[in-house]
Amino acid sequence: METKKRDIRALTKDQLRNFFVEQGDKPFRGNQVYEWLWQKSAHDFDAMTNISKETRQMLEDNFVINHIRVDQMQRSSDGTIKNAVRLHDGLVVESVLIPTENRTTACVSSQVGCSLDCRFCATARLKRMRNLNPDEIYDQVVAIDNESRLYFDRPLSNIVFMGMGEPLMNYNNVLKAIDKITSPEGLGMSPKRIVVSTSGVPKIIKKMADEEVKFGLAVSLHSAIDEVRTSIMPFNSTFPLKDLREALEYWYSKTKNRITYEYVVWKGINDTQEAADALVKFCKFAPSKVNIIEYNPIDDGEFQQAHSSAVEMYQNTLERNGITVTVRRSRGKDIDAACGQLANKS
């Protein structure tokens, strides 16, 4: 009976070193292989040219490298690139490269589908099929870094976990991926250039604070009134705003990092002065900034972008109260690559 090969990237460096010692080889061989797997992103053992043929064959006999494959790449008229990424088991997620004049941002996925049920998001309509492994998250970043160098002549500068899935529902794997991305033995990126975006899982936000993570936190808020938020994000009934607020206060007390709120203004849902005042009140307990994001319709038209006068009203209300606010225009809408549009239509 054929034994199932292990995924070699699930092993730590020490485990790899020990494996080679067990095979009667030198432990440094594990370091070499580890470097090929992470720093050099090798997708097969034959690429490991400073290792003997026999050793490569032995690795082939024992292990597999479950790398991703960019199945389809679409380019938007504004330069945005969307990748349909095929995983080793045939499932597909999407990731996006967003270029601006002086930076390139990777928007990566953390789950196939999503654990949560936000009614305005295309990804939420796909049930959660599984969490992504750390190496699958890492591979998305490597693919986008390669595209950034190829098409924009510069390396990737920023990463946002705003693709498919709720990152805090796959917390351990997301953390392991970020460790690899920021490690000198991986991509060596600064954690300050990474933002994890969550719809708000209070218990995990506190855990992140306790673990003193160095990356940024963004909260997909969209309403600071419980009944309204529950109507558009039903899981809010399980994680109400008071629990979210308490977790965010704790986060700030531990990390001293200001919180970013992502906020879409919809017609007839949260486009009132009362809603804007509630947001101001919610922002006051810890230093924060608000990104007002343009809404990108999904097929049924139930949610519609508010009138520009409502967005202006929000902007004025926040600024009048000393809260930093940015109105973000969406990128990649023509290829369904904008916020809330990732749904594997490919």
Image (cartoon, grey):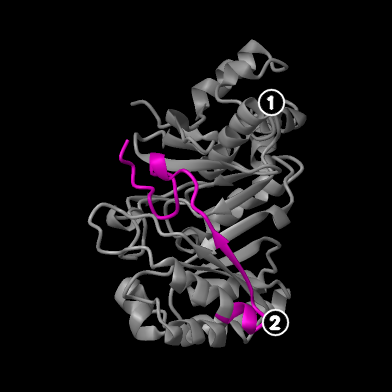
The answer to whether any part of residue 203 appears in the image is no
User: Which x, y percent locates residue 209?
Assistant: 65, 73
Q: Which mark is residue 4?
A: none
Q: Quadrant of the N terminus?
A: top left
Residue topped by disc 1:
24
Q: Please give the name of the residue rendered at 65% of the width and 63% of the height, measured from the top-left corner.
A: 216
Q: Please give the name of the residue rendered at 38% of the width and 55% of the height, measured from the top-left corner.
A: 296
Q: Please give the name of the residue rendered at 35% of the width and 53% of the height, measured from the top-left corner.
A: 123
User: Which x, y percent locates residue 7?
Assistant: 50, 36
* Image position of 50 (left or right of 138): right
Q: Could you tell me which secondary element the residue under label 1 belongs to?
A: loop
| Amino acid type, mark 1 | Gly
| Secondary structure that dominates the magenta span | loop
User: Which x, y percent locates residue 328?
Assistant: 54, 58
In the depicted structure, whether residue 199 falls above or below residue 128: below
* Image position of 110 (left or right of 118): right
Give the mark nearest the N terminus, 1 or 2.
1
